[in-house]
């Protein structure tokens, strides 16, 4: 159904409109020519379907480790985590002569470990799980895009000479070896500890008391390798890959990893008495170095869900996105001389039928981009521009996601090469956003949040949306407001 209004009725609406390139001066025109502006509205049906996405660009700072089963869909999801370690610029150990513990005259590190810290997790923290830690043969590459289906073992990133570290670790996310009062203290962060105290052999065949001793010896032989993270990763520790082995029901969200070396060293105090200190050196997996999560989805279940035409899905990490076909020709036909001021699309969630306390989270932020930009947008680290890419937040009040105005997208598609099969298709993608605070130079010193990063949402989320070719609910609609001068 179509309605027509005159400017006096629609002025408030147009004041908030985001106009396309045919309407640069509409704000002024409305004020000066209210009696000459005609506004009309229309609604059109939007087709949708689920599309399977076997992998996404894994560029997050959170790693995922474990295996869970989605209680609503029955889909299994496995996460494996790979990281490098960062060193401070020109890091220095104590002098070699000051190291206390020695075997046959050679110094040793007392112990070495990797700790995987997590502040959040999914599932039952008491479920027994098992992982294997693999030493990498060579570093991840800065100029390479690592997708979530990248397999470090199959691609030759793990040492295969039989002498590299391959350490099994049984764990529960609640560390029962740590007393409850310590776990509840404000300075405690849950972590998985992987000891690296067995005899270690480097790629040149040199043997060391443990992995920590190897790192310290590399420092004393080649301090230039510790000048920065690049040299450290290239020459000393390329990184580690933590692969799920067994267990079910928990997924740790790894926020930081640490490679820790413990040793004793001595010095002379002012009274010339020998004093022994306990030293710790930590190399961290942080934003300064590369990290990667390999995601394995249950392929058969994913195919079954995507084939359900009574709805569409959003399922992360990777898994399923929703594709919309925008009715651009219908919107623009007969309106060649009109401006499209508003093009609004609302997507409605279907509530989960499962009552499990372990239902996956609802995606909180989604993005709409052209179908053909599904990979390039993230590879080029683009940001939504409200012209052909848009963000929408989940509203618990309406149980919806609303794209308030995609008129720029409609205008751009109408001018595009319509021979392409995807010319009028967009994809809905769950994303994670990063904002920084920008201080204004104004007199009042106000500040605002500035969007600086958008990446794929790699957390465990799942939701059904109204739509699909056999949709039993009200159809998805795009609401259009046109304007033109009489």
Image (cartoon, rainbow, N blue to C red):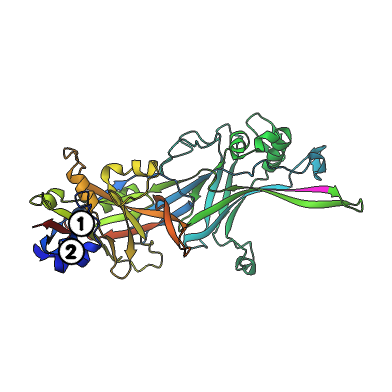
Picture coordinates of residue 33, whole percent (x, y)? 15, 61
Judged by depth in the image, the label closer to the viewer, 1 or 2, is 1
Please give the count of numbered marks on the rendered protein. Answer: 2
Q: Which residues are magenta?
A: 261-266
Which residue, given by chain and number where applicable, does mark 2 sit on?
473
| Residue 94 visible in image | yes
User: With 266 as the anchor, is 344 left or right in this view?
Assistant: left
Q: Is residue 111 above or below residue 8?
A: above
Classify 232 as above or below 467.
above
> Residue sitting at 17 percent across and 66 percent down?
10
Q: Residue at x 53, y 54 (%)?
A: 255
Residue in the foreground of this view, choosing between 10 and 138: 10
Name the spot of residue 99 as percent of width and height, x first: 80, 44
**What number is the disc on residue 405?**
none
Q: Is residue 142 within the magenta segment? A: no
Q: Give the secondary structure at mark 2.
A: loop
Picture coordinates of residue 103 (x, y %)? Answer: 80, 40
- Quarter-of-image position of residue 476: bottom left
**Quarter occupied by the C terminus:** bottom left
Q: Which residue is mark 1?
A: 26
Q: Please name whichever residue, 103 or 148, is drawn nearer the observer in this view of the structure.
A: 148
First along the sequence among labels 1 and 2: 1
Q: Quadrant of residue 43?
A: bottom left
Location of the N terminus (image quadrant): bottom left
Between the C-alphas of marks 1 and 2, the distance is 37 Å
Query: Does the rendering let one see residue 304?
Result: no
Q: Main secondary structure of the magenta part?
A: strand
Q: Secondary structure at mark 1?
A: helix
């Amino acid at each position: 159904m179509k309605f027509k209004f005159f400017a006096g009725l629609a002025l408030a609406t147009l004041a908030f409109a985001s106009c396309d390139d045919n309407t640069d001066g509409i704000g002024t025109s409305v004020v000066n020519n209210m009696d000459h502006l005609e506004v009309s509205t229309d609604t059109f049906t939007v087709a949708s379907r689920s599309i399977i996405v076997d992998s996404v660009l894994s560029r997050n700072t959170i790693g995922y480790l474990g295996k869970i089963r989605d209680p609503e869909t029955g889909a299994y999801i496995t996460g494996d985590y790979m990281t490098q370690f960062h060193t401070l610029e020109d890091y220095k150990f104590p002098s070699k002569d000051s190291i206390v513990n020695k075997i046959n005259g050679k110094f040793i590190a007392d112990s070495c470990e990797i700790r995987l810290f997590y502040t959040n997790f999914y599932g039952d923290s008491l479920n027994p799980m098992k992982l294997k830690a693999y030493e990498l043969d060579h570093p991840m590459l800065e100029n390479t895009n690592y997708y979530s289906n990248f397999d470090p073992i199959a691609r030759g990133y793990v040492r295969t000479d039989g002498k590299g570290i391959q350490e099994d670790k049984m764990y529960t996310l609640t560390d029962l070896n740590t007393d409850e009062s310590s776990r509840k203290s404000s300075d405690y962060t849950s972590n998985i500890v992987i000891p690296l105290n067995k005899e270690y052999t480097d790629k040149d065949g040199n043997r060391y008391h443990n992995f920590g001793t190897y790192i310290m010896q590399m420092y004393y032989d080649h301090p230039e390798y510790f000048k920065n993270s690049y040299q450290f990763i290239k020459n000393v520790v390329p990184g580690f890959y933590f692969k799920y082995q067994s267990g079910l029901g928990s997924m740790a969200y790894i926020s930081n990893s640490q490679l820790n070396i413990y040793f004793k060293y001595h010095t002379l105090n002012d009274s010339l008495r020998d004093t022994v200190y306990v030293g710790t050196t930590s190399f961290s997996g942080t934003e300064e170095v590369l990290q990667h999560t390999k995601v394995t989805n249950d392929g058969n279940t994913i195919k079954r869900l995507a084939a359900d035409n009574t709805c569409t899905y959003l399922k992360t990490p990777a898994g399923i996105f929703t594709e919309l076909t925008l009715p651009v020709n219908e919107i623009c036909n007969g309106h060649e001389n009109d401006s499209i001021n508003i093009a609004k699309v609302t997507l409605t969630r279907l509530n989960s039928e499962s009552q499990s306390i372990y239902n996956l989270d609802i995606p909180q932020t989604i993005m709409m981009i052209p179908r053909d930009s599904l990979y390039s947008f993230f590879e080029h680290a683009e940001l939504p521009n409200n012209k052909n890419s848009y963000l929408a937040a989940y509203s618990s009040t309406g149980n919806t996601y609303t794209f308030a105005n995609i008129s720029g997208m409609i205008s751009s598609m109408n001018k595009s090469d319509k021979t392409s099969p995807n010319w009028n298709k967009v994809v809905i993608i769950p994303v994670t956003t990063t904002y920084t605070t920008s201080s204004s130079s104004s007199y009042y010193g106000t500040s605002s949040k500035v969007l600086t990063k958008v990446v794929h949402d790699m957390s465990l989320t799942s939701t059904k949306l109204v739509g699909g070719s056999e949709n039993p609910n009200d159809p998805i609609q795009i609401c259009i407001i046109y304007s033109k001068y009489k």
